[in-house]
Amino acid sequence: MTQGTLNWPALQRHGVPDWLRDAKFGIYFHWGPYAVQATFGEWYTHCMYQPGTQHHAHHLATYGDLATFGYKDFIPMFTGEHFDADDWAELFARAGARFTGPVAEHADGFSMWDSKLTDWCASKMGPKRDIVGAMETAVKARGLKFLTTFHHQWLWGWYPTWDKSVDAGDPRYSGLYGPYAPATAFRNGGNYHQPLPYPDAAFCDLWLAKVNEVVDRYEPDMLYFDSRMNIITEAHRQQMLAHYYGKENEWGSELAVSYKHNDLAWGCGILNAFERGRMDKLADFPFIVETCIDTKSWAYVDEPEYRSTTQIVHDLVDAVSKNGCLLLGITPSAQGEIPQEQRDRLLAVGDWLKLNAEAIYGTRPWRVFGDGPTKVVGGVFLEAKTQPFTARDIRFTQSDDALFVIALGWPEDGKIVIAPLGMAVDATPVERVELLGHDGPLQCDRTAEALTVQLPDRKPCDHAVTLRIGRARKENPC
């Protein structure tokens, strides 16, 4: 693709690079001044200015009047003194992530790189470090793909810049809080995605300039865009894609863009379809499931509710079986520490992936995604609606020479029953059956109804176990 290609049909031809489809698992982190208050998460930066909310009451009681202590005043408290890019990147690598990186800018207007476009950035304030640059070096040194995420379209109307009684309405701070916009610029009748008015050209120009600055300086392998990008003009979105994809020849690498909803034309990147949700069927297109290690917040809070290692492994397996990837968020503290409970879970996921790698990385979905009693509730923000998986729930993936059956637990009776491999529905010969992590033969019985595999006395790992079934051919790759 040449730079300057500004139409959807040309941009739609890009598709999703194989490296991303093969990678399966990514990690990123929300880290910024919003981590300081450590009570309500990243939306505190908006809700602290909203009378009637818990956030607003907490802020007044803890920090005082918003005319004098606003979001800007958290920035000096965002010290990041323990931030160690090499330590973080090494942790993510050991966790088994194949792509990783930081939130480059959230809705708060604070840039986490050394920007020439704004003084409100991490290199000049707060930690006074180029966080994006440090992570780029550390991530690429470990052979991982570098991801940067952008949420800054949400800045339009995020703060009450129309309200002169709070600091956000002071034009001296517009570099952080954004330009003047009326209250309807954020939530017009409850709709974030149809503001009144839409952003002006200056806002869209700066939005694009920030993305391009990160692209040109740090050469990310993947760009992630949060929702609400639809409020940016179509021309600016097309320019962003053309500029970024135009770097492929210069850098000699395939690049990826993830987006939400209908914010880009279909085929311009990979759809980040399920924020804190699940896909409930086998998809004929690659997609991303996005969730966080903390079920309460995307950013650090003092009283988190962490997902278990088993939940994370099951999220990954379920997504991969349906043609997806998992992007997992973690939540460092304002001081730059990744809590030990998060580290332990990430390392345990990495241990599981070491043993079961061939069933995940580089695989493609089979003709069915799985079988079992647990019904998955599909959709966005609905992950809590699905009951925990059981050992009777199985998921399938395939490589060129094998079918993988992943049981989401260890059956009490020691048997994995695989109905989709019953002779009545699939007569393809089974050449051999192995349990990853176990040396020795397995007893199998194949009938018209199912293939039943007797497991050994000891399980090779926790969370989920994988059968490798030799097959004569790869079937129906998506």
Image (cartoon, rainbow, N blue to C red):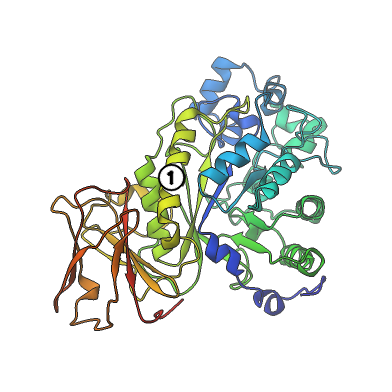
The picture places residue 429, in percent across and down from the top left corner, at 27, 81
Q: Label 1 amino acid?
A: Asp
* Tally of numbered discs: 1
Residue 382, visible in the rendered structure: no
The picture places residue 260, in percent across and down from the top left corner, at 56, 60
Residue pointed to by mark 1: 351
Q: Nearer the viewer, residue 360 or 333?
A: 360
The picture places residue 392, in percent across and down from the top left corner, at 21, 57
Tell me: 403 left or right of 224: left
**Residue depicted at x 32% and y 52%:** 464
Q: Which quadrant is home to the N terminus? A: bottom right
Q: Nearer the viewer, residue 465 or 176?
A: 465
Quick one: which residue is furthest to the right in this view?
A: 116
**Residue depicted at x 29% and y 76%:** 431
Q: Nearer the viewer, residue 162 or 208?
A: 208
Tell me: 92 left or right of 446: right
Residue 287, visible in the rendered structure: yes
Determine whether the residue tagged by mark 1 lies in a helix, strand or loop.
helix
Compared with residue 200, is residue 472 higher up or lower down, i.e. above or below? below
Quick one: which residue is furthest to the front in this view?
A: 440
The answer to which image quadrant residue 356 occupies is bottom left
Tell me: 200 left or right of 288: right
Q: Nearer the viewer, residue 137 or 428?
A: 428
The answer to which image quadrant residue 453 occupies is bottom left
- Say few, some or many: other residues with alpha carbon within 10 Å of mark 1 (under 14 / 14 to 19 / 20 or more): some
The picture places residue 169, in percent across and down from the top left corner, at 73, 32
